């Protein structure tokens, strides 16, 4: 069964925004494209190349050092903090839960955008969240301790291995 959703490329989105009615696979669809929503989305989409560059740098660091505690990973987290701050809300604002999350959704306009135009943004946010919220930019002794049975303990080393393996999978290394 084919979905009734309309998934537009950026070019078609911009074309439809100015021309109104379009036909998709034999079905005519009249959409109201809210310019403010498209402008907000395009502000995020403009960061695609910055995210791609940051991902390539991180991939090179991981391939070169093969250690999640290496100084260059800490520097990468710190250097990309501003970019992440600009993109932090992207998944919340435009992605749905489940398998639909690959195509951003403009809620007011009720249309989806092809995910390939923001694939690096989605990957960058995932990688950065993994490293930043795992506190890998901090020295080990300053990281928050986990509460286990009412007592605080340091996270075990096996967690670092798991996080590093997840990082490598996201980067397409393993």
Image: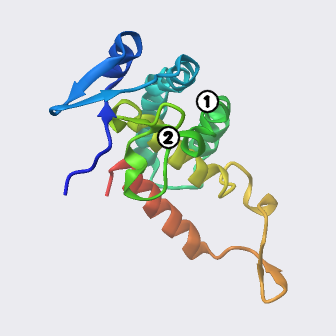
Badge 1 vs badge 2, beta-carbon distance below 8 Å: yes
Q: Looking at this view, is 105 or 133 the one in front? A: 105
Label ID, residue 68: none
Quadrant the N terminus occupies: bottom left
Residue 85 higher or lower than 132, as above or below: above
Q: Residue at x 44, y 47 (%)?
A: 62
Q: Which mark is residue 83?
A: 1
- The part of the image, by quadrant, that contains residue 93 is top right
Choose top left, top right, bottom left or bottom right for residue 18. top left
Picture coordinates of residue 138 (x, y %)? 73, 51
Is 2 or 61 nearer to us in this picture?
2
Closest to the observer, 161 or 103? 103
Q: Residue at x 67, y 29 (%)?
A: 82
- Of the 4 image quadrants, the one containing the C terminus is bottom left
Q: CA distance from mark 1 to mark 2?
A: 9 Å
Q: Residues within 10 Å of mark 1 (few under 14, many from 20)?
A: some
Residue pictured at 64% horizontal, 31% vertical:
79
Image vertical order of residue 31 relative to residue 151, above or below: above
Residue 49 drawn above or below residue 132: above
Residue at the extreme top = 18
* Residue 64 at x, y percent in the picture: 41, 45
* Horizontal side, residue 69 vs residue 143: left or right: left
> SS at mark 1?
helix
Q: Earlier in the sequence, mark 1 or mark 2?
A: 1
Image coloring type: rainbow
Where is residue 111 drawn, in percent x and y? 41, 35
Q: Which residue is mark 2?
A: 124
Query: How many numbered marks appear?
Result: 2
User: Viewer-proximal residue, 132 or 24?
Assistant: 24
């Amino acid at each position: 069964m084919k979905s009734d959703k309309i998934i537009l490329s950026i070019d078609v989105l911009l074309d439809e925004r100015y021309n109104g009615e379009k036909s998709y696979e034999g079905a005519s669809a009249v959409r109201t494209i809210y310019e403010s929503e498209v402008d907000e989305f395009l502000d995020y989409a403009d960061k695609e190349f910055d995210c791609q560059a940051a991902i390539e740098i991180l991939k090179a660091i991981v391939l070169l050092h093969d250690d999640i505690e290496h100084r260059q990973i800490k520097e990468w987290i710190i250097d990309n903090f501003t970019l992440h701050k600009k993109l932090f809300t992207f998944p919340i604002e435009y992605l749905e839960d489940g398998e639909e999350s690959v195509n951003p959704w403009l809620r007011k306009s009720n249309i989806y955008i092809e995910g390939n135009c923001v694939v690096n943004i989605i990957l960058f946010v995932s990688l950065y969240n993994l490293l930043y919220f795992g506190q890998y930019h901090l020295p080990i002794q300053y990281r928050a301790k986990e509460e286990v049975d009412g007592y605080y303990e340091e996270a075990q080393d096996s967690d670092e291995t798991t996080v590093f393996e997840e990082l490598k999978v996201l980067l397409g290394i393993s």
